[in-house]
Amino acid sequence: PLVAAGRQVRVEFRDGEPAPCVIALAREHAADLIVVATPREERIRELFLGSTVLAILRGAPCPVLVARG
């Protein structure tokens, strides 16, 4: 794990569908925050109609910060 601003930051890679993997990792590590980025090309409509980001927002066990590309 990395330490940034006094907080532990964890980066992991897994195979599988992105949203369930992110949610499972957050639960396993008792995450305080999930940070996800959306590509610049992603349209607002896609964000609200079933994207990976929306699935993470709906299932996350902690707050989610969404940053645009």
Image (spheres, rainbow, N blue to C red):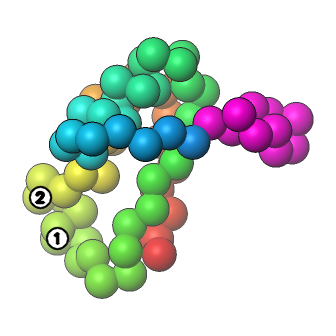
Q: Residue 10 shows which numbered tag?
A: none
Task: Give the SS element for disc 1.
Answer: helix
Q: Residue 58 in the image: state x and y as whole percent.
A: 26, 35
Does residue 3 appear to the left or right of 10 in the view shown? Answer: right
Query: In percent of the image, x 24 and y 33: which residue is there?
Result: 20
Q: Residue 36 in the image: state x and y as whole percent.
A: 45, 53
Per the rendered image, the range of residues in magenta is 1-10
Q: Residue 45 shows which numbered tag?
A: 1
Task: Give the SS element for disc 2.
Answer: loop
Please identify the residue farthest to the left as the structure is shown: 49
> Is there a contact, CB below 8 Å, between mark 1 and mark 2?
yes
Does residue 24 appear to the left or right of 67 in the view shown? Answer: left
- Name the kind of residue labelled 2 in the image: Leu
Query: In percent of the image, x 88 and y 35: which residue is there?
Result: 6
* Res. 58 in view: no
The residue that label 2 is drawn on is: 49
* Res. 60 in view: yes
Whether residue 14 is situated above or below residue 25 in the rendered picture: below
- Name the kind of residue labelled 1 in the image: Arg
Query: In percent of the image, x 19 and y 56: which residue is there?
Result: 51
Does residue 10 appear to the left or right of 55 in the view shown? Answer: right
Query: In percent of the image, x 34 and y 30: which residue is there?
Result: 23
Q: Is 30 contained in the magenta span? A: no
Q: Residue 1 in the image: state x and y as whole percent.
A: 71, 34
